[in-house]
Image (cartoon, rainbow, N blue to C red):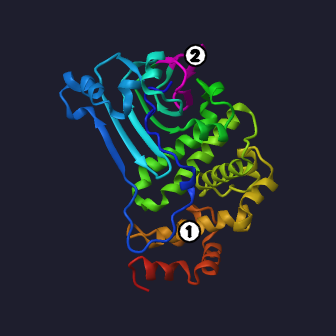
Amino acid sequence: MCGNVMGILVKYAPESMVPAGPQSGSQPPLAWGRLFESDLLPESQRYSCWRDSDVGGYRRRFDTDPHEPFAATIDALDLGPLVIGHARFTAQDWIRDRANIVADDCDDLVVNIRHRGGAVGEMEGRTVVAPAGSIVLADMAQVGRHTSDASVTSGFVLPRAVAERMLPSVRSLHGHVIAPQHAALLASHLTMIRHHAGQLPASSGPLLAQTILDLFTVAVTASLGSVPADAGQHERGLRHQLCDSIERHLGSPSLNTARLSRMLGVSRSTLYRLLQAEGGVQAYIRARRLARVAETLRGDGDRETIAALAERWGFCDAAYLGRAFREVYGVTPGDYRALHGGGRP
């Protein structure tokens, strides 16, 4: 199931996971690069140009057969230790046989996140049914063939030695499908990176790469019902999952430890441990809400009343928001808006 999965974006260096130190001067932002865009070509030449250009080594790795007029767009984001791919393809067959394996001598683990479009096929004797929203794992040392609907996918590649340290046997994972309920967090995280990476400096790439790998480990182990060998990585993945859940429900007045415990299926004590450095779950929620209020107050758009902001971000009333805000920022919300939002005191 590795056809439209960025099968060649192979770049991973564990030693590079150490975040870069402070740098002087402004830093360039992270940026997606366009590797191929069929819309720039005459329709009659799109498929042949893609094959002949061998973008990402696809010609060596797969035999393909389009089911409709061919179109494709392929982008890549270099995070330093990890390269993320994003692709749109029209429907086609993807075949990797022994001749392809000999031609490229690749034995990496390919991770395919299917945002849109399903796929069905067979991978070394395993029947594969991958709906939209699922993740498919493919061992490039083994054969496989599948038919993909028109799709939007993200993907990355792990060298075999790295994958074997993180996960169970790579060979046994060939054709394994991670169901949408276990894949959702990683899929949504990659979507957010797709849309917002340009707002972050390039030096944040290694940290982003680590979050992706942590969430991937959580997705695999949840799908297999097992505990990862690296408990620390599992813990980091749970923390990412917790923080993501908090962000998505930040404005809900009913967001609390009990609700998060039910949502994530872990105990309250586990939740507290994950955010202990921030003072616990409720303290973290309060801090994130206040940060959102401050962000809104700094904006130049329509000015909400303090009461409206309190309601939007889960505070019981404007008076409580005012007290909490002053404790953290040292001024009232109104004064903060005047100082930072371009208004007048």
Residue 262, x across and y down, in percent: 75, 45
Choose the circle earlier in sequence order: 2 or 1: 2
Numbered badge on residue 291: 1
Closer to the observer: label 2 or label 1? 2
Q: Is residue 192 magenta?
A: no
Count of marks overlaid on the render: 2
Residue indicated by mark 2: 124
- Compared with residue 159, is residue 341 higher up or lower down, i.e. above or below? below
Residue 125, x across and y down, in percent: 60, 13
Asked if the residue at tag 1 contacts the one at tag 2, i.e. Cβ–Cβ closer than 8 Å, the answer is: no
Q: Which residues are magenta?
A: 120-146
Residue in the foreground of this view, choosing between 166 and 274: 166
User: What residue lies at 30% left-to-right and 36% top-to-bottom?
Assistant: 36
The Cα atoms of the two marked residues, 2 and 1, are separated by 51 Å
Residue in the foreground of this view, choosing between 194 and 52: 52
SS at circle 1: helix
The three-letter amino acid code for the residue at tag 1 is Ala
The three-letter amino acid code for the residue at tag 2 is Glu
User: What residue lies at 35% left-to-right and 25% top-to-bottom?
Assistant: 59
> Is residue 316 at least partly visible in the picture?
no
